[in-house]
Image (cartoon, coloured by chain):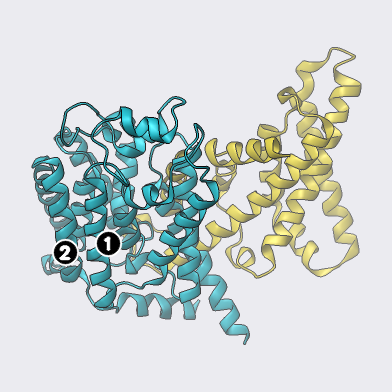
Chain colours: A cyan, B yellow
Amino acid sequence: MRENKNYVAKSMASPKPIKWVMIALIPGSTATIIFFGTGYLWNIAIATCISLILEGGCLVASRKRLSELHDGGFLITAIIIGLSLPPDIAPAIVITAVGGAILIGRLLYGGERNHLFNPAMVGYVIVLISFPETVSSWPAPVDGLTNATALVSMKYREGLTVLEAWNVLNGHGTIGGYGWEWINLCFLIGGILLILKKMISWQTPLSIIGTITLLSIANFDSGSMDSKGPPLFHLFAGSTMLLAFFVASDPTTQPIHNRDKAILGMVIGSITFFVRGWGNYPDGAAFAVLLGNAITPYLNSRRIKFNAKS
Amino acid sequence: MQDLILIVLGSILANNFVLAPLLSLRVDNEFATRPSSFLSIGMTAAAILVVSSCLNHLASEVLLSPLKLDYLSILIFMLLILSVAKALQISVIWKRTGLSRTLFVRNPVITIDCAILGLTLLRPEIGFSLLDTGITALLLSFSYAGILIIFAAIDKQTTSLALPQSFKGPPITLINIGLLSMACIGLL
């Protein structure tokens, strides 16, 4: 028990990465806004305001000092929720997501650097399972023909081969759907910046990307009707890079030891891929992160025991 | 075999039958985070579930169906599970060997959970064959052990957090279970 507390204290004392996370999010969010319009700006603005009000209100209600707001973790939560929800969605859905994230994901667990499950993904999953169609449908970036992300049209292509689906659904790009490949590339750049600044560890993102690549190579059959999509598609479509660098690598929910970080990445990557391939939802990243966070305490406690023995 | 695994995964993850018994909330934390506990909890659950579900299958095939007493099946199944669990517990007490003894004597909750699990998942109405029932029970008990251990670790970690006063203890466990079942919906 004592070791456990020490470890928690150590992870709480890690340097505050909030400023650098914000900076690293800039390229990705700029690309998203360029490709999909200013609806995202509205999402992020609403999410940020609501999260500020909720966090401040709860601090006042629980008689804590308002200076704890300086820590700013709730801003990252709000921005990630704003980026995950489709643009021009009803504000009530954004408010529900942020409310779930801040109240259930963060404050019930005692606020800053305490949370067990990633707050942004808690909020996102709440609205995803409450309003599945609204949250999964995105406006077409260019031609107004399609109303789905590349992942959605890949999933519900009704017996077309990969190449046919590509041609029928106009406006999809070369690798991961029009726009999405650039957005993911920008998030990748931001993530590499974070790793270079030593704000996040490299084990989890690398093992998520590696697992998704390996699984999609293993399942790829040159684009038949049952194909799950080529490897590059899985890496550069949907929210893979945002997931790998900004959500799953959250220092608070990371395991302590490096090997456990890689194991966590493998779990998250494989669940993401399996939900994309066989599940009912087009993207399984949020579910995968929640399940991965659930096994983190077990990974930690296992390691503590081994250390105590030796 | 693949069908069986799919059935088990689906019923555990999507329908949350395994998360439901966790609401009993009283599993001994210390015991569940011991290194060998995955195997031992799994073995305990497997012993009870496999024996009793196979017995129940036989009972319903040989006794109840021919005599047209199907409406008694739930009662009979409960009776069989509880008597098998009790019989194993008594036999283990006489043996006086360490681990299995602790398991049965200190954790009657596990046997009750097994009864709930078996009752919901392994009823003869589902239409499994005898072999299907046995293998499903085996896989089921090990995944039950896995979830129990994961939850014990989560509980241990939450006790070291600075939770709000009113959410310490059972409330935060309920919230953890809720969040985990939300995550499991994605695997449907």
Quadrant in the picture for the N terminus of chain B = top right
**In the depicted structure, whether residue B10 falls above or below residue A1:** above
Read off the residue under disc 1.
Answer: A188
| Quarter of the figure with residue A6 | bottom left
Q: Position of residue A32 (x, y in %)?
A: 17, 48
Corner quadrant of residue B129: top right
Report, in whole angstroms, how far the alpha carbon at label 1 lies from the one at label 2: 14 Å
Type of amino acid at the residue the image marks with label 1: Leu
Q: Can residue B155 be seen in this view?
A: no
Find residue A287 and name its label. none
Give the x, y percent position of residue A163: 39, 35
Q: Is residue B23 left or right of residue A65?
A: right
**Residue A135 in view of the camera:** yes
Q: Which of marks 1 and 2 is nearer the N terminus?
A: 2
Q: In which quarter of the image is residue A52?
A: bottom left
Q: Residue A22 carries which label?
A: 2
Q: Mark 1: which secondary structure?
A: helix
Estimate how packed mark 2 is, as few (under 14), some (14 to 19) or many (20 or more) residues with alpha carbons within 10 Å.
some
Q: Is residue B98 left or right of residue A90?
A: right
Residue occupying image coordinates x 29% and y 73%: A195
Position of residue B142 in the picture relative to residue B12 (left or right): right
Q: Position of residue A86 (x, y in %)?
A: 21, 39
**Identity of the residue drawn at 50% across and 52% down:** A217
Point 9% across, 46% down: residue: A41
Q: Residue furthest bottom?
A: A310
